[in-house]
Image (cartoon, rainbow, N blue to C red):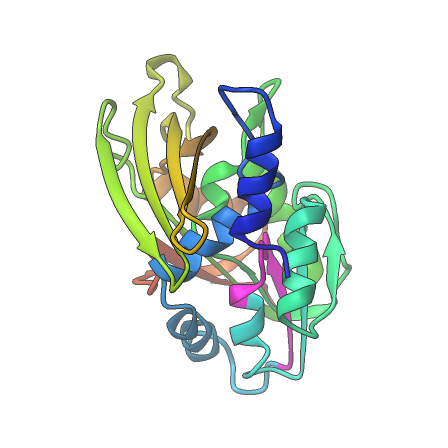
């Protein structure tokens, strides 16, 4: 399985300073920190708790390296993961036997296939606005079309006000062999406001140390991020066709929405 040693070797071969994408070259690093940041068993139990007892099929949108996919597979008969990154899908396929599909959540539809569809782990925060078209609305509409009548949609998001421009945070993640020091700078974009909420950017700086070999490398990356007006996102969910949309407290972070497709 690909891991931090692969990332360190790639950085070592590249020119400096090194800048990479979090969902491709740095996918193993993303998996390493997320596994230590979140309780994915609690996420799987949250999905099972918030969905009907007779639900059997689940689509996991933005499945990434497969942590939610793996946990949810223990509670349902059929679980399918969707992600746009081939590297993330590779990691997910190594983690779980659940099928994975290369898919853009904005445009890919599995017509009336699932009893449940999820976009969790804050993934909705990274769907951009492109040429005035909001990817979040497109993703909500695709999720709606992929659900059977009566099916349930779950997502989580950061509430408006969470993107504090200039905020700097530092964290350490460790295994028996590796230590990762991560610094994150949050930048808000005053001109990036949409009717769904604010737009900003996370800039990451990583220092990765192989404590066995004694090697250290540094790599940076950046990703757009969004916060949402609760009313705006609820309205967009209802606008996609869902009914009975309500707020919940997810085990990941921020706020969650559970919505139902009319039977």
Q: Is residue 240 visible?
A: no
Q: Position of residue 211 (x, y in %)?
A: 38, 53
Quadrant of the image containing the N terminus:
bottom right
Looking at the picture, tell me which residue is in the foreground, 193 or 231: 193
Vertical placement of 213 versus 207: above or below?
below
Q: Farthest residue to the front: give it.
A: 213
**In the rendered structure, does residue 45 fall within the stretch colored magenta?**
no
Vertical placement of 131 versus 201: above or below?
above
Q: Position of residue 147 (x, y in %)?
A: 66, 64
Vertical placement of 38 versus 45: above or below?
above
Looking at the picture, tell me which residue is in the foreground, 19 or 184: 19
Residue at the location (66% across, 41% down)? 106
Residue at the location (41% across, 52% down)? 33
Q: Farthest residue to the bottom: give it.
A: 54
Q: Position of residue 12 (x, y in %)?
A: 56, 33
Q: Is residue 86 visible?
A: yes
Looking at the picture, tell me which residue is in the foreground, 109 or 220: 220
Report which quarter residue 145 is drawn in: bottom right
Residue at the location (58% across, 20% down)? 15
- 86 displayed left or right of 66: right
Q: Farthest residue to the top: give it.
A: 191
- Range of magenta residues: 56-68
**In the rendered structure, does residue 61 fall within the stretch colored magenta?**
yes
Quadrant of the image containing the C terminus:
bottom right
Count of all numbered marks drawn on residues in the image: 0
Looking at the picture, tell me which residue is in the foreground, 166 or 122: 166
Q: Position of residue 169 (x, y in %)?
A: 23, 37
- 172 displayed left or right of 72: left
Residue at the location (23% across, 23% down)? 166
């Amino acid at each position: 399985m690909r891991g931090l040693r692969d990332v360190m070797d790639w950085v070592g071969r590249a020119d400096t300073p090194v800048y990479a994408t979090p969902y491709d070259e740095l996918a193993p690093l993303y998996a390493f920190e997320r596994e230590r940041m979140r309780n994915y068993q609690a996420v799987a139990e949250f999905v099972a708790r918030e969905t009907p007892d007779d639900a059997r099929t689940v689509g996991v949108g933005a499945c990434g390296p497969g942590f939610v996919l793996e946990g949810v597979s223990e509670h349902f008969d059929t679980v399918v993961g969707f992600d746009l990154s081939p590297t993330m899908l590779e990691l997910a396929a190594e983690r779980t036997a659940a099928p994975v599909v290369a898919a853009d959540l904005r445009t890919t539809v599995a017509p009336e296939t699932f009893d449940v569809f999820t976009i969790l782990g804050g993934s909705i925060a990274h769907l951009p606005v492109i040429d005035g078209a909001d990817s979040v609305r497109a993703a909500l509409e695709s999720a709606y079309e992929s659900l059977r009548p009566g099916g349930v949609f779950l997502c989580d998001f950061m509430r408006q006000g969470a993107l504090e421009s200039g905020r700097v945070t530092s964290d350490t993640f460790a295994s028996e062999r590796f230590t990762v020091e991560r610094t994150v700078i949050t930048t808000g974009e005053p001109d990036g406001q949409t009717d769904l909420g604010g737009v900003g950017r996370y800039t990451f700086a990583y220092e990765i140390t192989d404590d066995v070999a004694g090697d250290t490398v540094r790599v940076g990356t950046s990703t757009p991020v969004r916060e949402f007006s609760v009313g705006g996102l609820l309205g967009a969910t209802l606008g996609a066709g869902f009914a009975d949309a309500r707020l919940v407290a997810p085990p990941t972070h921020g706020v969650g929405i559970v919505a139902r497709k009319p039977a």
